[in-house]
Every structure is written in structure tokens, then in C-alpha cells.
Amino acid sequence: MGILRELGLPVLDNSNIDQLTVNLSEYLKSKRYLIVIDDMQTDQWSTIESAFPEDASSRIVVTTTIKSVANACSSSNGYVHRMKRLGDEYSEQLFAKKAYRKKYLGCMKSESKDVLKKCDGQPLALITVGQFLRKKGWPTDPSCEDLCKHLRRHLKNDETLQRMWQVLHQTFSKLPCHGSRACLLYFGMFPCDHSVSRKTLMRRWLAEGFVETQPSSSEKFNTLIDQNIIEPIGVRSNDQVKTCRTYGMMHEFILHMSTSQDFITLFSGNKAEGKYVRRLSLHDSGATSRSGLDIDLSLVRSLMVRGEAGKDILNFQKYQLLRVLDLERCIDLGDYHLKDICNLLLLKYLSLGETITSLPKEIKKLKLLETLDLRRTKVNMLPIEVLLLPCLVHLLGNKLQLPDRVDRVKKFCLAGKSNLETLSGFTTNGCQGFPLIMIHMMNLRKVKIWFGSERSSKSTDLVNAIQKFIHDDKKECKDPRSLSLCFDDCFETVLHSLKSPCYLRSLKLKVKGNLLELPQFVISLRGLQDLCLSSAKLTPSLLTALSQLIYLQHLKLIADELEDFILTDQAFPELLRLCFVLKSSNALPRIEEGALPHLMSLKLICKDLDGLADIKINCLQSLKEVTLDVNVTQETIDAWKKAATEHPNRPKLLLFNPVDESESEPAEGYIASTITECEAREVCTTSEAPVQEYNAQMLDNKGSTAEEKKRKNCTVESSSNDALNSAFAAMDLSEVPLTLTEFSVPRNSKVSSYTC
């Protein structure tokens, strides 16, 4: 109705959608048109699509902040263009123009970096915060330093920041339920620049009661990702989000909402912000033994400490309702604290750090504990009492050992009392305890084992335990069973002893020696979608055998040496993502026409890659993304740019830069990909462009061909929740450093999507 009115056509208020569609279609017939539908919040395209006649010379641009809406508005060959934020240089220029008077423009204050970090390249935030600080006397007034640190306190009440507050609050209010809002507010427990593990986050939500089941927690997480409220930082090789974070001003908004509602308590100047302490977060410089704390800790449900906590905070006799306890980064926690922790009978989530060397037997009192994370500890021997906890679901360690005598655990498992699903980070070293209990655990879904120097006479029980875990009962099972095996030596005895029939969704094999042939059980695995092989050398016979895995979707190969092999016609018919991590690029595979018909992502992580390495990506008809090592030469980058431009899909070209995994889950994802939007940046075509990206789809497009007879449609997805109309309404476009050389769509597509 809005479009018809803007076209000057009469519209009746009681018109139905079918009549409106016919009226608009009749009017646009035989006309060239450019129509922009701004800020679409639900999938309305499927309803209104027929209103727009198909015309190759016309365009429809849809802007949205929601990924699923952007995807729905694009055709199968379409492209969703994701709008990037301003880079550091342009953010600084825009902020300085709004915050500094002319006589101060040449001298940027050191606090400006903190402000720019909070604004995170978003024009609306840069403009409003700049205007706010200038009004308060920036940069000469000393009180402005405190304003920068506590912007959240002024978001709601200051008229200069009102527009930004409205945008952020609208985003928050549109979340579908109270549980989703609580899950978002929980991000206030973490520092702004902290990358949060997806799995850790969902386990805490479960422990807090924000969600009731694992599928529900995944749904809440995916909603926040879909609406661009949180952004992925680390992404695994199967394209699953590994770590995430909130962007700058959204994090300030979360802190304001969570502290004003007593949802989270932070420390400021060694004083607690908030009357009632339900969730307590200390970041590096919170309360210490010198603070003289005088707060009631009896209602605290969740406690997270980074840095020094102090004796008052670590007095666990004061806590009565604690459910989540995160002490991974606490530097003054000791083994002597654990006995008091074991009296926290409501505890459901417990993670400990490197200052812990052993666990007491009193841990058996934590009957409700669901997650125990010991990956950062120095605990070597796991007490049997841990495995007797009736509610324990996730047990995460780093080369943990078990004693040989596990009779009590065996009886516990046989009675059906064990609920363990994740058993990660155990080492064998010839002991019999681990295989004896593993073989009786009926609910296991994820197992990770580190193999020491096994004697063949002692490996039989372990092989039997693994065999039972991977056994295929031929039922249509959809459980995501995952197995990770890491070998120091003697891997042949175990790998070649496993027999079919077997079932796994994900398999990771890491050996220190040479993996010369693919174990037979791998070839016969039913349901295998994700496979990662890490070895000093991978042979052609092994690589050829991989092509028999016709249902494989994600493949990652890590090797010092990769011998020559050929990907023949129809090889890997279902593969979506292929990743090579190599020391040398001399033996990258030769890809024949017809191979990898559905491959979307090709990653070549090899710093000495020379040009295209004889890889013809035009053979990969579904390719959308190519990733190279950040250390390759400029000549190699240019060669891949040219190849991407000439490809029918014009795939994105990304540069991979290894990142510090210290903030993410250690050990558990030891061979996971960390391709991310921050670490795998798109290559820039010109140094002047404010957006640091390269995309062949946005290059010179010489118009529609004679064969094109269908309309093209663009979807523009805002990367943040500064809705485009809000941003444009709040800024003077003449002052914003934006460069638009050409906005075009891919050829031969009915509907194309752009995320701007």
C-alpha cells in the first residue's frame, strides 16, 4: 500500500493483498524501476514478489538487519551484501569532526581510542557520542574521562544519545520472549572485547534456567546471531559459530539494562553497582582483599572472576544459591578453596583455572553439577567421585587420567545412572580405568582421547570401548556422535583394529607420524559429515580413498607434506567446504572438470602459495568463498582476485590470520578452523575505500546480457542494529566519508541480495 501511494495510485484501506499485488504489477508492467524497501523485519518478500514484473533492467533493493530475511529475499544465485562498519581511520575522522572544536582537531586525546572502540565503526554511535562529549566540554573538561568509561549511565537520559538509545531499545524489545532477553543480558558478565564460547554460553544458560533444553539454547543463540545483535568471531570448519561477542554500544546498552534491573552486578571503584547481587562479574580489577566488601552474597546465582578476587569474594561459605561458578581466570584461587566449593549444593556449572592441581573427594556432594570444565587446570588424576555425579553431562579435561580400579563407576553406569554426553581430554597411558568405564556409558555423544605410548597387549579394551561407541545399529539415528583421536605413536594398532558397521557424524584424527592409508573403518562410516585428518604426510592412496566418502560435507586436511593427487570427475559429490593447512603448496591437488560440484568454500592455508597453484576455480561452479593465508605475496593475491572476478559466481576472497585462542575453548577444538570476520578479512581493492573488503561481485559489471529477461533484486543487510533509516536520519551525509563507485548485481540471477 505504501509503494502504491508513493506511485500516486489510489488505494482503498480495505484492499486485500491479492488486489494490491495485481494493481502494482499492472502499473509496473513495461516500466523500468528502482524500488527500495527499507528495514524489512519479517519475510514479506514471498508474499509481495509477484507484484513486481520480471525485467532484467529493473532493480529492487531490500535493507534489513536480519540475516534470515536477507536470505529469503535473495534468489538461489543471489548475493547478500553485508554492510561493513567504518575502519579505524574513517571512524576517527568522523568522531573528531563531531567531538572536537576546530582548534583541538590536531591533538587527539588518548581516551579517544576507548571511545572509538565502544562505537565500533558505527556512524550513528560515532556521531551521537561525539556530539554528547562535545556538549560536556570534550576534550578539555577532566570529567569527560569518567563519561567515556561509563557511557551506559547516560544512554537513556541524555537527549543527545536519545536516538541511539531508541534504536538499541527497539532491537532489544523485538526479541521474541523474556528468555531471549535474559540470554542477551547475560553477555554483560563478560568484558566488551571478550570472545565468548558458544558452547560455554549455552551451558551457563541451561544452568541458570534461562532455557530448559539444549535445542532451546541453540535456538536462542541462533536468534541473537540472526538478528545481528551478537556477531560471530570464531567459526569452525563446518561453518558453526565457535566464539562470538557483542558489538560496542550494544554492550553498553546491555550493561545499562542488566545493572539497572539488578540482573548483573559489576564493581566500580571497588564498590558494587546495584542493591541486590544476583550475578557478580569481576573483570581484572574488581574487589580485592583490600576492598573491605560489605555486600550480601547469599543471593548470588552466578559468579565470574577474571584476575584477583580477594578473600571476601572467595569466601564460599557466604554463598547459598550459586549455580554458575567461573574461576578459569581467577589468579588467587587455591586447592584449599575447593572444600568450600563442594558445599555449594545447587551448583550446576563449574570451571576452574591453572592454579588448581587436584580435586578433593568431597566433590561427590555436587549432585546437581552438569558441567565440569578442568581444561585450564593442572589436574592429572581424576577422582572416581566425579564420574559418580548423577547429573554430570559435560566433563572437559586436558589429558586427564583415571585410576585402574573403577568398579564403583562400572556399577553406576550399569544401573543407568550416568548421564555423561561429553567425555573430552582423557589420556590412556596404558591404564585400564578409562576404557572400562567408557564401554558402559550409554549416553556418550562426544569423546576425545589422547593416546600415549600404548602397549598392544593393553590396547584391546580401549579398541573395544571405541568400537562400541562408533557401532552402527542401522537405525535412522540423528545423534551428533563425534570422536577425536590424538596419537603420539602406535596409532596403527588402534585404527586398523576398528571394524564396520560403524556410525559417526564427526571424526578427527591427529597423528604425529605419517598416515599412509585411510583406515577401513573410516571408509565404512555411515553418516559421516565432518572429517579432519592431521598428519606429517598424507599419501595419494589415502586421499584417493577419501573420495569414497560420498556423503562428506566438510573436509579439513592438515599436513607437513601432501603428495600429488587428482580430484577426478564426480569426486566428493556432497562436499561443501574443503580446507588445506599445509607447510608447502607444491602438491596441492589437481581438480578436474566435474569434481566438487557443490563446493562453496575453498581454504588454502599455506603461506608459500605461489599464484593459483594450477587450481582452476572455474571448474567449481558453486564456489562462493576462497580463503588464503595472510602471509601470501601480493602477486598471489592479485592472481586470485583476477580468478575470482572471472568466475561466474564472483566469490569472496578472504585472508586468514591465526588468532589467539586463549579466550575460546582450549583443547576441545584443537583442530577447528578459526576463519572469522575479524581474522579472515576480505581483501581491499583500493587503499582509499573506507570499507576494507574485496568482493568480485561488486566489481565492474557491464550490464545485462541479451539473454537476461528477469528482474534482479538486491537485499542489503545491516551488520548492526543501527537500522539504516536511523543512521541516515541522524547524520549529515556530506560529512561522512563514504565511497560508492558502482552498485551492481551478479549477472544471470533473478533475485540478488546485498548486505550493505
Image: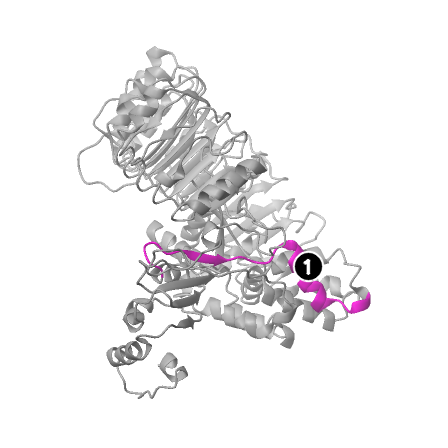
Question: Which type of secondary structure does the marked residue at label 1 adopt?
Answer: helix
Depth check: give the residue in front, 297 or 67: 67
Residue 603 colored in magenta in the image:
no
Question: In the image, 713: left or right of 256?
Answer: left
Residue sitting at x 63%, y 63%? 737
Which residue is rendered at x = 39% and y = 14% of the image?
490
Q: Is residue 139 above or below residue 571?
A: below
Q: Name the one closer to the observer, 95 or 37.
A: 37
In percent of the image, x 77 and y 58: which residue is there? 109
Q: x, y percentage for residue 333?
A: 60, 39
Identify the residue under disc 1: 92
Image x and y of residue 151, in percent: 65, 65
Q: Nearer the viewer, residue 527 or 445?
A: 527
Q: Which residues are magenta?
A: 74-103
How far across and down, in percent of the image, does residue 453 sit?
A: 43, 15
Q: Is residue 183 above or below residue 684?
A: below
Where residue 660 sits: x, y (%)? 57, 39
Q: Quadrant of residue 386?
A: top left
